[in-house]
Image (tube, rainbow, N blue to C red):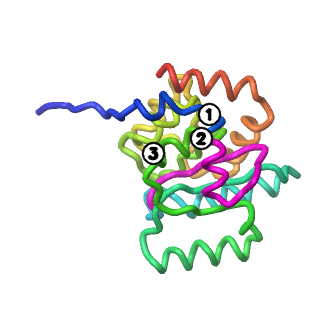
Amino acid sequence: WTVINTFIDTRELRRASKADCRRTLLGRAGLAQAGFIVAGCGTTDWRKGPDLFVTIARTYFENTNDDQTVFVWIGGVSSPEERLRINHDLRLAGLEDRVIFIGHQVDAALLVAGADVLALTSREEPFARVMLEAGLGRCPVVCFEDSGGAPEFVAKAGGIVVPYLSLNAFAVALQRLRQDEALRATLGDGAYRT
């Protein structure tokens, strides 16, 4: 057996500025500005938790009067039925302007680097490459414990690990990072160094 560690091509990420990545992400989401951007990334299958992303956003907004935050999911929709389910939930939850699914993007790593926080809502994740990409963009990660390799990376000072499927704890962690810029910077630096 041979272990091949996860790797990413860092050249493009190292050349891009956070401000440029943020402008690009906002543009793809059809937004002129946002005070705080929570990114999600991946296909929209059950394992990646796009439904949890929507519910976490709902919980976040129910517990704060923050109208400057936007949740942006980067990644392809797995089926037309899944797109209908997502749109249905967004419409009935009143989140159509606050949670935006922008579909598959060839430069997803640059877009994640433009976010303030990566919400890794995966129910199971062997070791998400997107965490490494977020780390290069100094973007802290929030994830679930017992979800695979993610908590190991995040627990080394790259973000916050919350109890498995505790959507309230996840939303609270996002609110904490929204309010505490110094903590966000410290964890982002930790993700970069890890």
Q: In the image, 192: left or right of 63?
A: left
Question: Dot 1: what SS?
Answer: helix
Please provide percent x and percent y for residue 42: 46, 55
Identify which residue is drawn at 60% across, 27% down.
188
Pointer 1 with pointer 2, Cβ within 8 A: yes
Measured Cα–Cα span from mark 2 to mark 3 = 28 Å
| Residue segment shown in magenta | 22-43
Q: In the image, 28: left or right of 103?
A: right
Pointer 2 with pointer 3, Cβ within 8 A: no
State the residue in front, 34 or 19.
19
Residue hosting label 2: 21
Please provide percent x and percent y for residue 82: 49, 74
Please provide percent x and percent y for residue 59: 74, 56
Identify which residue is drawn at 41% across, 42% down.
128
Residue hosting label 1: 18
Give the amino acid type for the residue marked by disc 1 in the picture: Lys
